[in-house]
Image: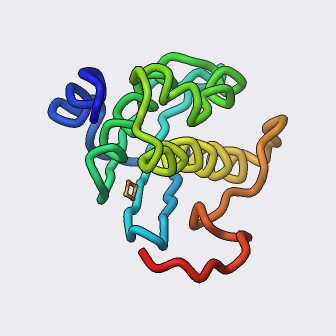
Amino acid sequence: MYTEKVMDHFQHPRNMGEIEGASGIGTVGNAKCGDIMRIYLDIDKEGIIQDVKFKTFGCGAAVATSSMATELVKGKNIQEAMKVTNQAVMEALDGLPPVKVHCSLLAEEAIHAALWDYAEKNGIQIEGLEKPKSDIHEGEEEEEEEY
Ligand code: FES
């Protein structure tokens, strides 16, 4: 059900941990499954992401997508990091099963939340960046489904 790349990133996650004194930290949860992801960014004066770490309390797909997302933003500038969407992360992992697509959304949102934190701390605005949600389902219609 999972691709080799997903299994690889799940079993050998890259960039797991935290950064002390990070330039930006973003935390996003998914109330439906209870999973939480936190991303730490270390951004230099030129706006380049020098280091990135993550902590994910969640399912295997969430661990794999956080790991891949950190690999994709490392060494990039902010505008390039903004292009690391959940779609891009999924493609880099050679796909995710449909029921696990929402897990990759956590990675995109957590990166955006960390960039937002960085922008706020530095009094800057990042083009195209919207205020992050603390939960990926925030603002959705209440659904009756049970999970
Ligand atoms: Fe919750 Fe994957 S099941 S993030």
Q: Is residue 66 left or right of residue 2?
A: right
Q: Is residue 18 visible?
A: yes
Q: Residue furthest toward the left?
A: 11
Whether residue 22 appears in this view of the structure is no
Judged left or right of residue 66, residue 133 is right
State the residue at coordinates (63%, 20%): 77
Q: At which x and y percent is residue 118?
A: 63, 45
Where is residue 36? Give x, y as percent: 40, 61
- Up-down relation of residue 102 to residue 86 (above or below): below
65 or 123, which is in the foreground?
65
Residue at image coords 38%, 63%? 35
Q: Residue at x 61, y 51 (%)?
A: 113
Q: Is residue 79 above or below residue 147?
A: above
Q: Residue at x 27, y 35 (%)?
A: 1
Quadrant in the picture for residue 47: top right
* Residue 110 spot, x, y in % from top left: 53, 49
Q: Nearer the viewer, residue 12 or 33?
A: 33
Relative image position of residue 74 (x, y in whole percent): 46, 22
Quarter of the figure that contains the C terminus? bottom left
Identify whether 33 is placed above or below 120. below
Number of dots carrying numbers: 0
The colour scheme used to paint the residues is: rainbow
Q: Quadrant of residue 125?
A: top right
- Specify the quarter for ligand 1: bottom left
Looking at the image, residue 39 lies above or below residue 133: above
Quarter of the image holding residue 133? bottom right
